[in-house]
Image (tube, helix red, strand yellow):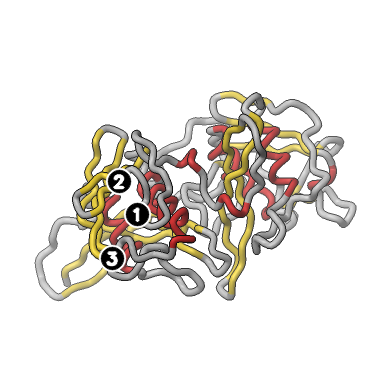
Amino acid sequence: MQKKCGLLLLLILSGCSAEPEEGLPVKVVYTEEEGDKPVAAEEKVMAELYVVDENGLLVPQIAAVEGNGQEEQAALIALAEGNIPAGFRSPLPEGTVIQDVELDGKTAIVSVGGAFANYPAEEEELVASAITWTVTGMGQADRVQIKFNGETLESMPKAGLPIAAGGMKREDGINLKAGYTDPGATKPITVYFTGQNEQGPYLVPVTRRISEDETDLIAASVKELAKGPAAGSGLMTSWPADTKLTKEPEVEDGRAVLQFNEAVLENNGEALVSSSLLKPLSLTLAATAQIESIGVEVEGHPEVKMETGAPLPASLTTPLFVNEESLPSAE
């Protein structure tokens, strides 16, 4: 029996020791086909496709795509073909053709055709952000330019959303309508809130604007998490509004130790922290402050446990994928 194996790279939010971490765990998935002779492994890689939920927000969902050296193109083809979980839809109009994705240094040049421009004008930002975040999530490019019918776009074709000469990037924002935009000199941060449909909860990135003069991105991120999502966005948070850091975060080699007030504890008088706080915090700090792992403490409580009763791990590593179910675990 002939077998092909795809390599799916998975990383969970997990406890880790102070020792250097080994390589990412690999999950091998086999499919069987007729035949007697073994063939070379056909690699599959996991991509995060940015799809639209019932609230009109972009949500990362993982999908296996061909690992043939053209992963960015494979991810966009999967997004255009619309093979997407129930409760979500593709932001790209039916009939969109992904012709090519060329990497020029850290810039991905995405060539599209077909019915690409047939999206509603009010969804133009969704389309631009979905392409940008799907492509840059593959790790090789940090900017995206779009060619439509062979012409490099200086603005999106339907409502005229400007495209910078250097290309679109994650710092341009995502799900802006779900955030608060302050006037004046600002800079973006990305925070994660929770959405839900019939299939269950999922995490959603939201761009917030903070003062250009803000230097403590960790404290600013915690403040935005505690603010919660905008009213009417369809999003939720487990972070209490009175959450505060009780001392300056300790940051070293990509690891941050944060001490919170008692607001983060479960409302039962015990020193318990809900896992629903930890993954949004980890993802937010990774996106905003390049923090790779976190330690969580609570003022006045030397021993803190998870809501399950298990010890709170000393260090929690940021998950590789946003919406893959994962819980903290101690080593």
Image coordinates of residue 61 in percent, x first then y, are: 45, 60
Counting other residues with Cα less than 10 Å from the Cα at mark 3, is it few (<14), some (14-19), or many (20 or more)?
Answer: few
Counting other residues with Cα less than 10 Å from the Cα at mark 2, is it few (<14), some (14-19), or many (20 or more)?
Answer: some
Q: In which quarter of the image is residue 199?
A: bottom right
Image coordinates of residue 196 in percent, x first then y, are: 61, 67
Residue linked to disc 1: 157
Residue kind at label 1, given as amino acid type: Pro
Give the CA separation, mark 3 to mark 2: 16 Å
Q: Quadrant of residue 266?
A: bottom right
Relative to 177, residue 300 above or below: above
Question: Which residue is drawn at the image coordinates 47% and 47% (left, top)?
Answer: 320
Relative to 177, residue 292 above or below: above
Q: Which mark is residue 153?
A: 2
| Image side of residue 192 versus residue 268, left or right | left
Give the CA separation, mark 3 to mark 1: 11 Å
Residue linked to disc 3: 115
